[in-house]
Amino acid sequence: MASSRPWGRVGGEAGPLVTINVVVLLVVVVVWRLRRRTEARSRFDEKLTVVIVLALGVLIAPTPAGEGIANFLGQLASGVTQASR
């Protein structure tokens, strides 16, 4: 019997599917890329890292963790603004 999922197996018993959280994968890629020495990075490498970090931000933003980070940064900016007056 064929599975209704496009990634399912045709015939036989389907085994466990491994899922990879895209956010976790991007975090690993960013950390791995940033651990390299600055001198060893080309301009293309730096631009690619920026694009990956932006994609990570877009994926994190609508989650509760992203909202918590935004709330924390907003409070921090407000505190800095008030302290400078």
Image (cartoon, helix red, strand yellow):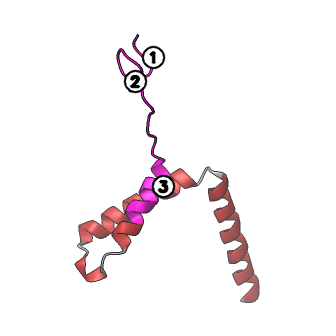
The amino acid sitting under disc 2 is Gly
For the residues labelled 3 and 1, the Cα–Cα distance comes to 27 Å
Q: CA distance from mark 3 to mark 2?
A: 24 Å
Label 3 packing within 10 angstroms: few (<14), some (14-19), many (20+): few
Q: Is residue 5 left or right of residue 75?
A: left
Seen from the viewer's position, the closer of residues 45 and 74 is: 45
Residue wearing tag 2: 8
Q: Residues within 10 Å of mark 1 (few under 14, many from 20)?
A: few
Can you name the residue that lies furthest to the bottom here? 84
Relative to the observer, which residue lies in front, 61 or 32? 32
Residue at 73% x, 76% y: name it.
Answer: 78
29 to 84, vertically: above or below: above
Kind of element beneath mark 3? helix
Q: Nearer the viewer, residue 55 or 37?
A: 37
Dot 3 or dot 2: first in sequence order is: 2
Q: Nearer the viewer, residue 84 or 41?
A: 41
Q: Nearer the viewer, mark 3 or mark 2?
A: 2
Q: Which residue is mark 3?
A: 24
Residue at 23% across, 73% down:
42
Residues in magenta, as a range:
1-30
Res. 31 in view: yes
Most extreme residue toward the top is 1
Q: Check disc 1 and report the residue beneath it.
A: 4
The amino acid type, in three-letter code, at marker 3 is Val
